[in-house]
Amino acid sequence: MFEAHSINAEHKDLIHDIAYDFYGQRMATCSSDQFVKVWDEDEHGNWHLTASWKVHSGSVWKVTWAHPEFGQVLATCSFDRTAAVWEEIVGEGSGPGERGMRHWVRRTNLVDSRTSVTDVKFAPKTLGLLLATCSADGVIRIYEAPDVMNLSQWTLQHDISCKLPCSCLTWNPSLSRLHPPMLAVGSDDSNTSNGGKVFIYEYSENSRRWTKTETLSNVVDPVHDIAFAPNLGRSFHTLAIATKDVRIITLKPVQDSAQSGLSRFEITTAKFEDHYCTVWRVCWNIMGTILASSGDDGCVRLWKDNYINNWKCVAVLKGDGTSAQSTETPLTTTPPNHPTGVQQPLSTTRNVTIATVTAEKPTAPIMSTSKWQAPVTKGRFSKSVWLGNPAEPSPLPPPILDRPKSKK
Amino acid sequence: MGENIQGSFVSEKISKIRWKHEDFTEAKTFLTGSWDNPVNKITYWTFETNEDNETYPAVISSHAFLGDVTELKFISKDFFVASSSLGSVRLLQIQENPYAQFKEHMSWDFIHNFKTGDYASCTALSTFEQDIVSVGEDGRINLLTARQKKPVRTIENADSCSLYCVDFLRHSEILTGNLRGHMKVWDLRNDQDIPATTFMLSEQLKTEAVSIAHHPTQRHIVVAGGGDGSLTVWDLRHNTYPISQLNAHARSVSEILFHPDRPENLFTCSVSGELWHWNNAQKTKMKLDSIDSHWLNTIGANGKVSVVSLCTAMHKPINSIDIDRSTLLFGCDNEAIYVVKDIIV
Amino acid sequence: MDETDNAQIIGIPDDLCRKAGIAATWIGSNKIGVHAYKHVSVRKHCEDLCKDLAPFEAKVHSLRPEVILFSAPLRKLVNESNGVFLSIQKMKPSASSDTRPELLKHSKQYRSILRACIENIQDVLEKSTPDYRSTLEQYLTIFYNVECVWHLTEILYIDAIPGEVVLPQLLEWVRFHFPKRELMAAKVLTKKNIASELGNINYWEAIIGCALHGKLEVVRALLSLHSKADHPAFLAAENALRTMPIYNVYGGYSINEFMIRWKHWQLDLLSRLESKTFISEPNLEDIMKLVAGDDTALWDFSEYTDAWYELLAAKLFYSVPCCKQSELSRHANNIAAKWQASKHQDNVILSLMDSELHHVIKEIQYMNDNGWFAAHLTDLLYHCGKLKVIHKHQINVTDQLHEALLLDYGTTLMSHHSLWQVGASYLEHCSEQGLARLETLLQTLSSGSEAKINKIIDIARENNLHNVVNSICKIQGMKCIRQDRLGNALTWALKAQDGAFATYIADQFLKHYAEKGEVMCLDLLENLGNCMLVSDRLTFLGKYCEFHQTYGIGEFKGAASLLVSLLVSNLTPDYFWSTLLWDAVPLLEAEDVILSSEDTFELMRSVEEHGDDPKFQDKIEIFRLAAARNLARALNLEGCQGKH
């Protein structure tokens, strides 16, 4: 069973991307209607629209949040050949409990690209405030805000040409110092004879340059999305690729590869063709344990690995025309986020419980249907509730240390 | 684990627990406040006896509460004030007739807030008869009185940092403690919004002052608990240098409680799950009344004070304690409340 | 390990999603945001595409799996069992002492908690509305089954069975979990009517049920209430039942001796059956056939059992009373196969009897209890040393399996607004990946009041996750800045010893002063102590405040020397020079000579070097004049003093 909260995002066109902030409490949506909307979730799981503004003069392809250490910051990229960085500004409240006005200001407009900017991503925060963009003419650009407290100053640090049109990029989120900064770029070039469509770039501290260290030559079909899994202390990297199927690739750094001139990584690929058609998007959960892939079959498939690193499809989501199960739930309490009950005319929230429609393949019934039968004896057989282990030694007298008194 | 401790799981983390003291008999009912739920509760409890002749806490009534319950204090037999992490304070009454319920008599809404209009947590409050003082993360002090909707006085920028604790030293004087361990005494007769005295919880270590308690009969004796688990004792008549300073608990001290009738007994609980009973081993009550030798002054020096753990360390923070006669209550982040009976005081 | 494919299909009630297709974005660890999605080639506009779909509502659906453990009655189970779990983790694994008795105690504690939970749900059930009722009934079924499996696991793997003869425990288990007919019997017995068979339609059913459970005393008591209890058939039955040998490890007989006695008794009964002793009473005869170990009679009675393992217990009791644990599997498989047992619970129990723990653990992950059972039972077996899971290539993956289950369970709890502390305590005990997960998840906990933040930081500190502490402090500081609370922001920066951030905040203070001429948050800045050393800029600010403080109380000498030391410190930010220099003017012009000639030279040198700030241009002449006058006075004074 799933619980669902649905909102009408009120975009006048298709939503291309949604992004959640670090806490999953703020959502940004972007669309071909050239707008970005920001939504805040209250304690009860209802989403409230808090901002909506025109960000570009073309379709907005991607929207992404910066780490909250940098404030409330978004980046967008568009068909209009630009990318932009936005910061939320909060004004003073007009009185106790009256929330100050919030609005988003454009901190910078990155206009270096001569074609549509197809993806934009902030680097892991350990690298500072870095932003990577890629564009349809095959250029990857890395911008930096040298003063992280000043979001209006960005410098173009690197300008890397990868020859093929770029459709997507991803930073390696590893926080380990052992791993150099790394990003992967995918190309949706449809000519399979052009070879590999995924490129790995690494930054060398010595040469202060990004260099292509790997081309995944076994991915020759157009790549539409790409995502490194959160690393969580693993020694290897996991990369998900949306191409004509779902690929999950592990890259194990090889020691001393510089000397031997061999590949930097030991690469293993897992391929899943369950969508039976093109895969458009891939997305990892925060721990890198479940991958969501969206395909042209109109389904989202969730892939989970088990303790021996076997990936398996655990659930399939798909659009369903009927919405009979949904019920309107009026908001009864004023969400505390909005102490004065500021009207949120644009937000409509519906609570739905979505039951699993069918099992994909017939499976053995999981629960026995037999009803509960009362046991004869009463519940607890140890005298009272759990307090601690009786076998643990009885509490020792606490250590008390007198601090030297401070004398002036 | 002693037989004298009994626990009940209540499906919510307990931030505050308070006996409803009775005049001439032992308390039979108590209040709890919860935290960290989308909607929290203040619950009124009594004890019932089951067929095995065991008494256990049972709910009389429950009151939905927006935000975390950050403090509960009785101001009379059945009136109490409750503060919330959404910056509000409420005055509620426990009504028994025609059925048990809470009646709200006053609500000071969002009296703690930031310039941006966001609510600020009301972190603590203290009461003196009908007067209430509240402090919050906005560094503001609000003086309230039970019968009046408008705050009597607001000290807007009382502190540049979040205030974490407050105590009425006497009717005209309060003590506040903040996130940096700054302690400030405020003379309420003074119209200027500046503290009478400022001193430090600890000169060496900058840790937050998280809890304060004063001696029930000698109000100038004040104990403050630190975010590092330390306890600091002052005799505010003399000076503001601590008379003793102890590295006590392993982690932050959640609450400090003097036994209301037998002040030679002190109880402290901690985020590390410890619950300690401090007792003047010699029980020289005569000495207590002498001028400047309260046992707290000499804790470290001569080791006359006995300290015992009342239970094996809990694996989650103990947030709140209260005692009536020989029965102590405590509430914990493992979503349970515990009753400790027959404490020798 | 071949996993059964049980991917579920979840329908999103959204017509646009159906027409256009969908895309999904994760929210944290287990929530997912879904919206209608159609791929548009970047190189061409999408307007035409959208026309096909119009009119539409672009919706976003956020989905989260329903976790039953988050319901109020089950939160008790979650919290209380956490105590037992942590207690087990504290046990020192030692070769010398057997931890088995201790673990058995813990196992019983878990079951006790389970039963209390079941009982509590029953209590709540009585008072609840019909909708909630069915949900609670579902919980009851789940945890009843959990307890049933746990009980058997405890018997077979955690408890030490004396002489390896499993029957007594097995009977006890079956009796506990199928009490229906014993309750029936109790009802009949309490009435104490002669000729009970006439007054109670359940009379024979109760007897059969009790006979299947080996409750011979009850059977005898019931038979004695029959109207024909004094007839020969009944007397013979009573005699046979009374004399039936029951194996007891401590009974003084070896198994062999017991078997001889038992066989003898059985032969005796068989001969009575053959001589048609019971023929006049068909019901009684069937029961006596069962007692004599007749397989046909056993299966005839299967309608009076609810599960195959009930029948198994009867089979063993009357045919193989000394069945050892190692022989259990064979009998169990025979019965289960003939019964055509196929329910999930059946498979789990059969696997237990087969000693296929790995399979058991795999199966119990599908008990719809959100992993509570799998995590806790596996952990207990792991600590018992009973768990050994071998993957292909003979790789031992026991540790991985154990950790994976704890990780899943802990992660689930971490996603709850209140149970995150409990969740964290499971992750803390996962040696491989636990800390990395905790590191990630702690940071994503929704921040509320500082009280909550402090508790999160506390857990991070306990686990030496210093970068989590620093990151949380930084985010708190940024939040404070947005709320225009520079003082509190500085406090958070100091908490994390974040020099760069402290510098930024100190700059804001100084700039504010340079512009407005007032120092904010004096109460904080005057009491910085050693903490100011975290950043040069903050040191400058702290000292500058000290200068003002000293000046304020009229200690001009002290103030002057502080000012001069600030001037020569090389800590002054460019934008602040003019302010600092201007601060010297009143000291230069004071009635008494406060600044020495040397100090004055220092001032004049500074003004030459840094006095080019446009803001200072109208003041520079005044400054020079004041400095010159003071220099004259100071030299004069120093000259006089020098003479003496």
Image (cartoon, grey):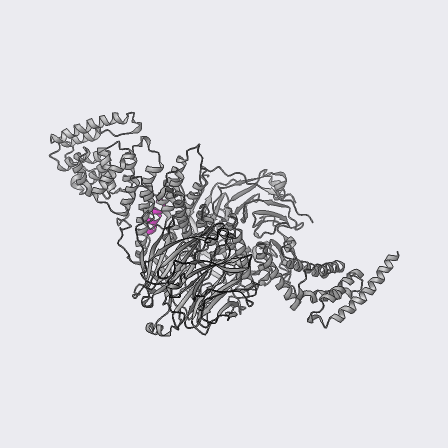
Question: From which residue to which does the magenta span run?
Answer: C115-126
Q: Nearer the viewer, residue B309 or C58?
A: C58
Residue at the far right: name it: C643
Residue name at image x 76 percent, y 62 percent: C602
Left or right? Give the position of A23 relative to A350: right
Q: Against C486, is A250 above or below? A: above
Q: Nearer the viewer, residue A61 or A365?
A: A61
Horizontal and vertical percent for residue A295?
A: 34, 62
Whether residue C596 can be seen here: no
Quarter occupied by residue B140: bottom right
Quarter occupied by residue A34: bottom left
B173 within the magenta span: no
Horizontal and vertical percent for residue C565?
A: 72, 58
Whether residue A370 can be seen here: yes
Quarter holding the C terminus of chain C is bottom right
Horizontal and vertical percent for residue C179?
A: 26, 42
Q: Against A102, is B66 above or below? A: above
Left or right? Give the position of A351 relative to C641: left
Residue name at image x 69 percent, y 49 percent: A408
Predominant secondary structure, magenta span: helix
Q: Against B191, is A58 above or below? A: below
Residue name at image x 61 percent, y 64 percent: C508
Q: Nearer the viewer, residue C278 or C521?
A: C521
Left or right? Give the position of A70 relative to C119: right
C117 within the magenta span: yes
Horizontal and vertical percent for residue C485?
A: 57, 62
Quarter occupied by residue A245: bottom left
Q: Nearer the viewer, residue B337 or A153?
A: A153
